[in-house]
Image (cartoon, rainbow, N blue to C red):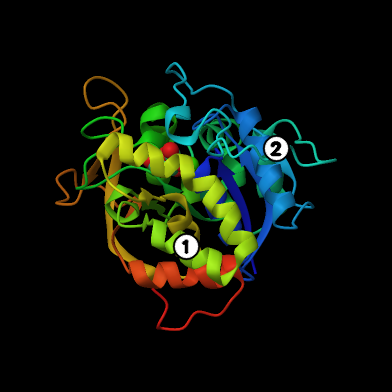
Amino acid sequence: ARKLIIDCDPGIDDSLALMLAAASKELDLVGITTVSGNVPASMGAKNALKILSMIGKPDVPVYVGEETPLVRDYVDAMDTHGMDGLGESGWPDAEGLTPNKDAVSFLIETLKATPDVTILALGPMTNLAKVISRAPECLTNLTALVSMGGSYKSHGNCSPVAEYNYWCDPDAAAEVFRAFSELPQLAGKKLHMIGLDVTRKIVLTPNLVEYMKCVNPGVGTRIEELTRFYFDFHWKQEKVIGCVINDPLAAAYLVDPSLCSGFDAYTQVETGGLCIGQTVVDAMNFYQKAPNSHILTQVDVRRFFLMFFERVLGVPQEESAP
Ligand code: BDR
Ligand code: CA
């Protein structure tokens, strides 16, 4: 199995991604690091422990990461994820589990000690930017980075052009993309960008929640509690019944890259002004630069949901599933 660290900000959809990754034998989850994003990093770490304890994986260590973006003032997303980051589900703290400090050191030490580490970034990339500036040599052991963030042609969710994770810490995102272009340790590797072009198609609807409750009442009910706030937010904000769950698609892509397709390109992130946080994807190769990213633009939504249900609910899915 692939050695994996999930860097995240749980977060309703981060929690769904953790459930999917933890239920996937192809992935060996060696640690979870948190960053300030949807909620402050320390709250995110407590939430990660709640999820781990709920799914029976209390041994996975959790590390609290950076509390503020590199340059910008921190803006949380509690309006979307609730004051507790878990949709105000009221779940108690994980008994007997406490988070560790210093996610950046954990990332550096793990990368130094372990050949072939994959990182799944589901929040702002502040921790990763710190790893790059403090210990670029450890990146030789980074096999792949899959990042949920950005958008190519799709509109943003924080501004007309910017997606939340990259908008929250644009300087960190810019630094990580730059590293994939410039650092010898990352030569030939690409940042796989699972942006809003693909995640926006992953819409959880009330009937899918009902289906999950029928198939596995325990897990289905937890997911209902977790996502209720998210459904309400989408209704108030956009008058749509259903919520976009971004992060689990990035976890699913790690397990089976054939779920999404896209193209290689040189990408930069805007760090100031009107377009702050925008991913500028040079699809036409104006800059004549070698690609530093793989931009995913197409997704097989049905196969994603079949994978999610099968693994998270623990019940094989038939083609007849909704
Ligand atoms: C991303 O921002 C967060 O609100 C979600 O958890 C996801 O990672 C979507 O823009
Ligand atoms: Ca997230």
Closer to the eye: label 1 or 2? 1
Residue 4 relative to residue 256: left or right: right
**Relative to 191, is 161 above or below?**
above
Q: Residues within 10 Å of mark 2 (few under 14, many from 20)?
A: many
Task: Answer whether residue 117 is visible to the viewer in this image.
Answer: no
Helix or strand or loop: what does disc 2 sit on?
A: strand
The image quarter containing residue 163 is top left
Determine crowd level at label 1: few under 14, some 14-19, many 20+ residues with C-alpha closer than 10 A: some
Of residues 318 and 89, which is closer to you in this image?
89
- Secondary structure found at label 1: helix
Q: Does residue 66 appear in the picture of this structure?
A: yes
Residue type at numbered disc 2: Tyr
Left or right side of 250 for 33: right
Q: Position of residue 312 (x, y in %)?
A: 58, 65
Residue 210, numbered label: 1
Asked if 280 appears above or below 290 in the picture, the reply is above
Ligand 1 image-quadrant field: top left
Q: Position of residue 225 (x, y in %)?
A: 56, 47
* Residue farthest to the top, as pictured: 73
Foreground of the two, 259 or 172: 259
Location of mark 2 (residue): 63
Q: Which of the marked residues, 1 or 2, is nearer the chain's N terminus?
A: 2
* Residue at image location 58% in from the left, 56% down from the top: 221
Q: Quadrant of the N terminus?
A: bottom right
The answer to whether the residue bearing label 2 lies less than 8 angstroms from the nearest atom of ligand 2 is no
